């Protein structure tokens, strides 16, 4: 329910099913699949296509394979399973990468646990988004980079990494930042292994062959995963398809372009304000502030003329550069550590690497010293304490996600399903989600058509005044009044915030509250969220205990308050 019927994930599920419409396999059939996530979309499309063929073969699927947007739970489940599979594979690749770097399975297992329990990485395993797909290709690219450095500089490793980096960029544009450090390391390693002058190699025949082959390979990948990006030039998105995956670099360096106009809800702020907001987040995340510390510690080997791994140096410098770029470029109202997701594995590996280095240094001390066990114990305790919050937050967020049937949104869904005859084909204004609803709401039978009310210019064309339900986006509450003042609405379904905004409209048009969905207590009000890492109440063991009690008590309700209004003259059964 949560993956399909609310939020951005609902749009993605709907967009994937639109790929079965004409033209088949086109990412441009729906705006939410047009910009990124192409790899996840393609794989989900093929999985669902296989399920449809099998269903046809065994006579359990009686709809056309193409041209129909299905609402069947099995297809939505297939999308979630695909996403989870990539999230699981990324953990396995991370383990293999760590083992290749450190040659120790125990250390690799510990590093993998840190990755699993990282809240702003873990959410992508159960949230229907394309980021988990991108992470799999990021780690695969880094894996072959390390093979290239530590084993043998085979050209095939370079090309595999290039393909993976293109695929991860098509999964999410800002993942493309990893192109720079990885290509740099390939270049430096190859020249060092074969003792070739850097500048001389840039003008060599081999380098020229690479410059010719990579664009051709890039075009071939585009042709396979998104052929309409080449052939469908009449589409509004096609005009900039060649640069779309890379325009994130331009946007990050031109914040006014990246954040858009104030009317979009992404209000640009000054660098000082952005720095303050991001610093507040960075300072609370051990992976980040420890890596910033490593940046300054790099000067110590320079002073004592100690040689460090080039891979480690580039990784630390790049991670810190990425953190600065996010502060500079992402000056919006969205301050979430999930935007640091692409460098999450590098942050972990950097800390593990320096921990091993320190441990090996301690082993060189005389055994009679008590300093070695004391320092080792203190370091271990500090690491455990630093990541204790992450383990608790991730555990609690998973418990909260699994409790979706206790949420006020789910209770509303059940109520509307039981009263389909009342709500079917009625004009309804709905504003109960932090994100947009999909264009067809399956809470009502037959499914009701949905039109979005949003002040974003890009989506204005989607406002359909003949729709059954008008869904308020999280930024358009006041703006929505302009669209509904001449509509004969029968029901209003609003959260508390929207109820206050529409207070005068409710009074003047004679609406009355007929049903209220409220959390069992004030504390449970905030136990559902898309981004659990921003919820302070998830950081305690007391929250864990309460979430467990929620699963034990079937009558406990969590989530924000939702009020259902109806016209006073409306006769309800």
Image: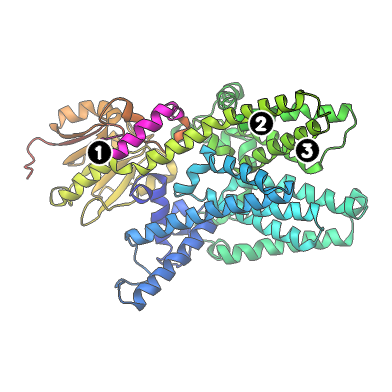
Task: Point out residue 74 in the picture as x, y percentages from the top left corner.
Answer: 35, 61
Q: Who is closer to the viewer here, 248 or 131? A: 131
Residue 558 falls left or right of residue 77 = left
- Location of residue 309 (image quadrant): top right
Give the residue displayed 81% in from the left and 29% down from the top.
367
| Mark 2 crowdedness (10 Å alpha carbons): few <14, some 14-19, many ≥20 | some
Determine whether 367 is above or below 164 in the image: above
Whether residue 550 appears in magenta in the rendering, the answer is yes
Q: Secondary structure at mark 2?
A: helix
Point 65% across, 38% down: residue: 347
Q: Which residues are magenta?
A: 535-558
Q: Which residue is mark 2?
A: 324
Q: CA distance from mark 1 to mark 3?
A: 58 Å
Eye-nearest disc, 1 or 3:
3
- Could you tell me residue 510's position as x and y percent? 12, 31
Q: In the displayed image of the protein, which residue is found farthest to the front? A: 368
How many discs mark residues in the rendered view?
3
Give the CA separation, mark 1 to mark 2. Answer: 43 Å
**Measured from the top left, where is residue 200 in percent x and y?**
92, 52
Pointer 1 or 3: first along the chain:
3
Residue 237 is left or right of residue 307, and the answer is left
Image point (56%, 63%), residue name: 225
Above-or-below relation of 236 to 382: below
Mark sitting on residue 484: 1
Please indicate, yes or no, whether residue 240 appears anywhere in the rendered image. no
Q: Can you tell which mark lies on residue 313?
A: 3
Colour theme: rainbow
């Amino acid at each position: 329910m949560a993956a399909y019927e609310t939020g951005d994930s609902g749009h993605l599920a709907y967009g994937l099913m639109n790929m079965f419409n004409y033209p088949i396999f086109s990412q441009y059939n729906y705006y939410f699949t047009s910009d990124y996530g192409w790899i996840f979309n393609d794989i989900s499309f093929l999985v669902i296509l296989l399920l449809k063929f099998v269903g046809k073969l065994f006579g359990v699927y009686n709809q056309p394979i193409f041209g129909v947007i299905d609402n069947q739970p099995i297809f939505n489940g297939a999308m979630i399973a695909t996403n989870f599979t990539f999230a699981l594979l990324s953990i396995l690749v991370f383990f293999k990468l760590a083992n290749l770097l450190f040659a120790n399975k125990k250390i690799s297992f510990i590093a993998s646990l840190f990755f699993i329990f990282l809240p702003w990485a873990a959410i992508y395993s159960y949230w229907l988004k394309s980021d988990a797909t991108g992470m799999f290709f990021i780690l695969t690219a880094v894996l072959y980079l390390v093979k290239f450095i530590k084993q043998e500089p085979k050209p095939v490793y370079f090309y595999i990494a290039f393909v993976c980096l293109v695929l991860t960029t098509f999964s999410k544009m800002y993942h493309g930042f990893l192109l720079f450090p990885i290509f740099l390391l390939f270049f430096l390693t190859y020249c060092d292994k074969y003792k070739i002058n850097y500048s001389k190699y840039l003008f060599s025949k081999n380098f020229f062959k690479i410059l010719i082959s990579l664009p051709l390979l890039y075009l071939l990948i585009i042709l396979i995963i998104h052929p309409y990006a080449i052939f469908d030039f009449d589409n509004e998105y096609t005009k900039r398809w060649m640069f779309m995956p890379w325009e994130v670099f331009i946007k990050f360096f031109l914040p006014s372009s990246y954040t858009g106009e104030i009317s979009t809800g992404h209000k640009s702020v000054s660098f000082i304000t952005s720095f303050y907001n991001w610093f507040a987040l960075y300072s609370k995340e051990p992976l980040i502030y420890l890596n910033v510390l490593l940046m300054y510690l790099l000067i110590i080997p320079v002073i004592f003329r100690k040689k460090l791994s080039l891979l480690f140096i580039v990784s630390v410098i790049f991670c810190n550069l990425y953190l600065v770029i996010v502060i500079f470029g992402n000056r919006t109202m969205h301050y979430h550590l999930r935007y640091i997701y692409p460098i999450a594995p590098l942050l972990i590996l950097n800390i593990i690497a320096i921990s091993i280095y320190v441990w090996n240094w301690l082993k060189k001390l005389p055994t009679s010293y008590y300093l070695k066990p004391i320092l080792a114990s203190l370091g271990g305790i500090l690491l455990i304490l630093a990541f204790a919050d992450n383990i608790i937050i991730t555990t609690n967020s998973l418990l909260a996600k699994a409790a979706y049937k206790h949420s006020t949104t789910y209770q509303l869904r059940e109520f509307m399903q039981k009263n389909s005859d009342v709500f079917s084909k009625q004009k309804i204004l709905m504003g109960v989600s932090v994100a947009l609803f999909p264009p067809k709401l399956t809470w009502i039978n037959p499914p009701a058509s949905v039109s979005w009310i949003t002040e974003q210019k890009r989506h204005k064309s989607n406002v359909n005044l003949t729709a059954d339900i008008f869904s308020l986006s999280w930024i358009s509450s006041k703006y929505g009044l302009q669209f509904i003042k001449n509509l004969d609405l029968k029901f209003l379904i609003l959260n508390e915030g929207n109820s206050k905004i529409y207070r005068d409209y409710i009074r003047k048009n004679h609406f009355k509250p007929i049903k209220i969905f409220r959390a069992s207590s004030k504390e449970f009000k905030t136990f559902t969220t898309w981004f659990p890492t921003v919820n302070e109440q998830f950081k305690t063991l007391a929250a864990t205990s309460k979430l467990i009690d929620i699963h034990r008590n079937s009558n406990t309700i969590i989530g924000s308050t939702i009020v259902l209004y109806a016209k006073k003259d409306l006769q309800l059964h």
